[in-house]
Image: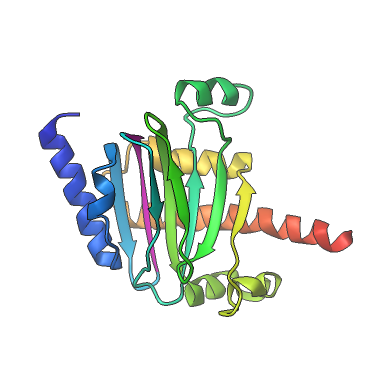
């Protein structure tokens, strides 16, 4: 990537971070960003996705967001293909972990480890607790722990095929020429549907034991 293109990408990241009240200046120097796109649906939700190569080993501690009682949902290790070729794709991208989802409240900091020359790709959704609760409606009772301020939860879930297809739609397909914001919001809601469908199945299985 040229220096000029890097400047554009860094500027896009900075503008997106500013909208959410995040500080990223001390983080960008550790990455060679190959792609980035951020979309905001404030005050309820924001989504960004991209890929980058880690320049040096480093540790990042996540910060607060201006989203009220914000919840972070990050879909890590996005791969262009999935199924029988996952292992080979991870080798090509210098990753050892399968695609997974991490859910956490912004009220607690997350410590993330990055290793030099690792290719990192993700889709991230930041969402207000009330908006998520309204989205889940009657199903919200299954996920009370997400809305309990005293509960510092941290959840990890492997991606289902449906989730993986949707994150690949978001990050790999060419964006539409019209109604871009509507398209990305629709895809974000689709991701939430598949994720919480998977989580509810897990909760139901655990309750049977």
Question: Residue lying farthest left?
Answer: 4
Residue 24 locus on image (x, y percent): 27, 55
Residue 90 horizontal side relative to residue 42, left or right? right
Tell me what residue is drawn at x 67 percent, y 57 percent. 199
- Find residue 44 and report its image quarter: bottom left
- Quadrant the N terminus occupies: top left
Question: Residue lying farthest right?
Answer: 209
User: What secondary structure is the magenta-colored segment mainly?
Assistant: strand
Residue 188 locus on image (x, y percent): 45, 55
The front one of 30 and 128 is 30
Q: Is residue 88 above or below residue 71?
A: above
Residue 115 horizontal side relative to residue 142, left or right? left
Tell me what residue is drawn at x 75 percent, y 61 percent. 203
Q: Is residue 135 above or below residue 206?
A: below
Residue 187 shows in this picture: no
Residue 201 forms part of the magenta stretch: no
Residue 28 shows in this picture: yes
Tell me what residue is drawn at x 30 percent, y 66 percent. 20
Residue 191 horizontal side relative to residue 67, left or right? right
The front one of 68 and 171 is 68
Q: How is the image coloured?
A: rainbow
Tell me what residue is drawn at x 32 percent, y 42 percent. 175
Q: Give the range drawn in magenta.
A: 45-54
Residue 75 locus on image (x, y percent): 50, 47
- Find residue 127 and report its image quarter: bottom left
- Find residue 64 and report its image quarter: bottom left
Residue 144 locus on image (x, y percent): 66, 75
């Amino acid at each position: 990537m040229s220096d000029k293109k890097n400047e554009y990408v860094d500027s896009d990241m900075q503008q997106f971070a500013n909208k959410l009240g995040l500080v990223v200046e001390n983080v960008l120097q550790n990455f060679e960003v190959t792609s980035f796109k951020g979309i905001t649906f404030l005050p309820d939700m924001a989504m960004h996705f991209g890929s980058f190569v880690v320049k040096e080993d480093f540790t990042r501690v996540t910060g607060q967001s201006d989203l009220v009682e914000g919840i972070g949902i990050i879909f890590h290790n996005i791969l262009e293909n999935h199924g029988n070729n996952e292992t080979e794709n991870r080798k090509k991208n210098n990753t050892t972990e399968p695609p997974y989802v991490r859910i956490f409240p912004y009220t607690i900091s997350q410590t993330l480890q990055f290793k030099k020359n690792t290719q990192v790709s993700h889709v991230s959704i930041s969402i207000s607790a009330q908006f998520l609760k309204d989205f889940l409606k009657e199903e919200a009772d299954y996920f009370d722990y997400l809305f309990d301020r005293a509960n510092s939860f941290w959840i990890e879930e492997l991606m289902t095929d449906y989730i993986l297809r949707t994150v690949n739609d978001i990050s790999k397909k060419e964006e539409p020429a019209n109604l871009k914001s509507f398209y990305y919001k629709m895809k974000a809601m689709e991701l939430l549907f598949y994720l919480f469908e998977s989580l509810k199945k897990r909760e139901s299985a655990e309750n049977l034991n």
